[in-house]
């Protein structure tokens, strides 16, 4: 799951875009649309589910590295020791670290090895989600895991392991009834392992690489200012920052390009530093339509988490729970699971 999980076709008879600009422009627009819409609900119960389970009940493992941050209603705030550094300073530090740090994403894999990228998401679904309305009487929280195995030779099969969603909290006076209605709906939610030749996924009539910008890596400038200009020329007004964040998603670009992408973000005034804890900096992007946050490790130059900090009114969802948190963990493994389909 990336900032957008599904690729939506844009009808050619409704818009006219230069061919060389269409791909990047569409990606940025899709991201904003996806962030504004509810995700499909496919969940299963987890043993031990109980009413009113809050953030603490998930444990640090479910939230990954992001668990060191303190979340309160309305914003992500830093624990004691936050500095007065700016987002630009934090991003520049991360940019420099991306070039200096030798880490998993840049390691040379031996034949047969895989770069393992695990993405987890914890997301709130309410009885108003399907229509974009606030929660009325019930909500639940679900935990999703997707693991991508990137082969040493990226022209070979990429393996994607998807685990069935799990319910990790139920909220509100009618939360259990709402959850039962959702669980009663037809669903394909189940554990699966699929192989994607050369890492290309197909959504309907559209095929797209999992590493979505890989075919443009060579043409992307490594100078941050030039790279920002490149993105601004290929995205609708105001979407360059989102497009750059999507390029950084899952940390798959090579180190020199990741450094330039982080440097390009540091040039944009829409980003502000909202929390800092040791090597982790939480940065927020805000505009008239939406607010997004992400956590970057300034020691490694790696993206750690992506957060939708939206809050739900009516006191149905407990204070302190953002709408969704995605976290990323990377490692090198000697094998991948066998595809089931």
Image (cartoon, helix red, strand yellow):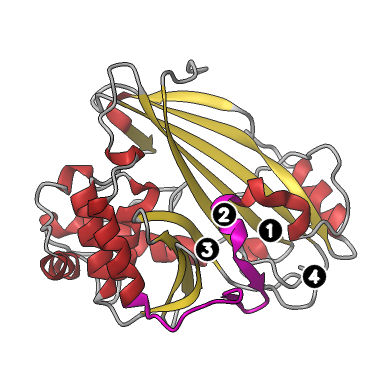
> Is residue 74 on the magenta stretch?
yes
Kindly report the distance in space between the C-alpha atoms of the residues bearing marks 1 and 3: 15 Å
Q: Are marks 4 and 3 in contact (CB under 8 Å)?
A: no
Q: 77 or 153: nearer the eye?
A: 77
User: Which mark is first along the chain, 4 or 1?
Assistant: 1
Picture quadrant where residue 309 is located = bottom right
Q: From the viewer's perspective, is the residue at label 3 or at label 2 nearer?
A: 3
Which residue bears the numbered disc 1? 125
Q: 24 or 89: nearer the eye?
A: 89
Point 16% across, 48% down: residue? 216
x then y, percent, for residue 169: 78, 53
In what element is the residue under mark 4?
Answer: loop
Q: 120 or 16: nearer the eye?
A: 120
Q: Are marks 1 and 2 in contact (CB under 8 Å)?
A: yes
Which residue bears the numbered disc 3? 307
Kindly report the distance in space between the C-alpha atoms of the residues bearing marks 4 and 3: 20 Å
Point 71% across, 54% down: residue? 141
The numbered disc on residue 316 is 4
Q: From the viewer's perspective, is the residue at label 1 or at label 3 nearer?
A: 3
User: Which mark is first along the chain, 3 or 1?
Assistant: 1
Picture quadrant where residue 38 is located = bottom right
Which residue bears the numbered disc 2? 39
In what element is the residue under mark 2?
Answer: loop
x then y, percent, for residue 207: 30, 38
Kindly report the distance in space between the C-alpha atoms of the residues bearing marks 1 and 4: 11 Å
x then y, percent, for residue 275: 51, 74
Q: From the viewer's perspective, is the residue at label 4 or at label 3 nearer?
A: 3
Magenta stretch bounds: 64-88
Kindly report the distance in space between the C-alpha atoms of the residues bearing marks 1 and 2: 9 Å
């Amino acid at each position: 799951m990336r900032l957008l999980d599904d690729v939506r076709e844009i009808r050619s008879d409704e818009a006219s875009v230069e061919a060389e600009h269409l791909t990047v422009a569409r990606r940025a627009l899709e991201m904003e649309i996806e962030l504004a819409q509810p995700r499909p609900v496919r969940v299963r119960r987890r043993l031990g589910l109980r009413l009113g389970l809050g953030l603490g009940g998930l444990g640090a493992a479910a939230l990954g590295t992001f668990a060191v941050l303190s979340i309160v209603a309305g914003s992500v705030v830093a624990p004691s020791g936050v500095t007065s550094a700016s987002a630009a300073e934090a991003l520049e530090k991360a940019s420099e670290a991306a070039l200096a740090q030798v880490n998993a994403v840049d390691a040379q894999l031996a034949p047969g090895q895989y770069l393992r990228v695990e993405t987890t998401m914890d997301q709130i679904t309410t009885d108003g989600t399907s229509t974009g309305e606030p929660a009325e009487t019930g909500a639940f929280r679900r935990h999703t895991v997707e693991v991508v195995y990137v082969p040493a030779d990226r022209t070979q099969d990429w393996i994607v392991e998807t685990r069935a969603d799990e319910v990790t909290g139920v909220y509100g006076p009618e939360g259990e009834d709402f959850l039962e209605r959702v669980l009663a709906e037809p669903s394909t939610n189940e554990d699966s392992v699929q192989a994607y030749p050369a890492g290309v996924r197909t959504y309907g009539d559209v095929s797209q690489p999992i590493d979505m910008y890989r075919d443009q890596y060579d043409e992307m400038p490594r100078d941050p200012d030039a790279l920002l200009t490149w993105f601004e020329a290929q995205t609708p007004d105001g979407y360059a920052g989102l497009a750059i964040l999507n390029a950084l998603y899952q940390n798959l670009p090579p180190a020199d390009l990741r450094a330039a992408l982080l440097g390009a973000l540091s040039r944009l005034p829409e980003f502000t530093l909202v929390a800092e804890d040791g090597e982790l900096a939480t940065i927020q992007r805000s505009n008239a339509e939406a607010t997004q946050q992400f956590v970057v490790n300034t020691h490694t130059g790696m993206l750690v988490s992506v957060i939708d900090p939206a809050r739900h009114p009516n006191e149905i969802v407990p204070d302190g729970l953002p709408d969704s948190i995605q976290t990323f963990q990377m490692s090198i493994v000697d094998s991948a699971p066998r595809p089931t389909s």
